[in-house]
Image (tube, helix red, strand yellow):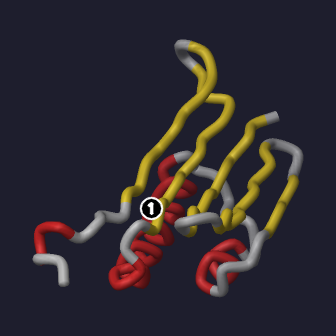
Amino acid sequence: KKKNGDEKQNNLAYYLEGEENFAKNLLLNLNVNNPKSKNEAVKLFTETTEKTFKTLELEMPKGLLEAIKNAKDIKNENEVFNTEFKIDKSNIETYKMEIISK
């Protein structure tokens, strides 16, 4: 049995792509390395998703939060930006929420 300090940590990261004064793509990425704390990690991912849309003053696509909660992929497109949420499953689960400006 592993000691408390030896457990793998989940990690949440932001990736921004674009030019000096303009981000074209934003990716919020959660790697679930520790399934025991997955619920806590997904809650933080959801809160960060909400804060991201609020900070960018963008309307959150309908169904996005439910898709995250239910671990279902979703795509949304409007005149200003595309949003995609998906989960990649390999050795670990990876939650990805991407905003792509047009």
Left or right side of 34 for 87? right
Residue 83: image location, x then y, percent: 75, 54
Residue lying at 66% horizontally and 50% vertically, measured from the top left: 98
Q: Nearer the viewer, residue 23 or 3?
A: 3
Residue type pointed to by label 1? Thr
Name the residue that disc number 1 marks. Answer: 48
Left or right side of 71 for 80? right
Q: Give the answer, above or below, for where 15 lies relative to 58.
A: above
Where does the N terminus fall, quadrant-wise? bottom left
Within-10-Å neighbours for mark 1: few <14, some 14–19, many 20+:
some
Residue 75: image location, x then y, percent: 83, 62
Residue lying at 51% horizontally and 65% vertically, measured from the top left: 50
Left or right side of 83 for 93? left
- Secondary structure beneath disc 1? helix
Q: Give the answer, above or below, for where 98 lies relative to 93.
A: above
Q: Give the answer, above or below, for where 33 lies relative to 24.
A: below
Q: Nearer the viewer, residue 27 or 50?
A: 27
Furthest residue in direction front, as rendered: 1
Where does the C terminus fall, quadrant-wise? top right
Residue 67: image location, x then y, percent: 70, 78
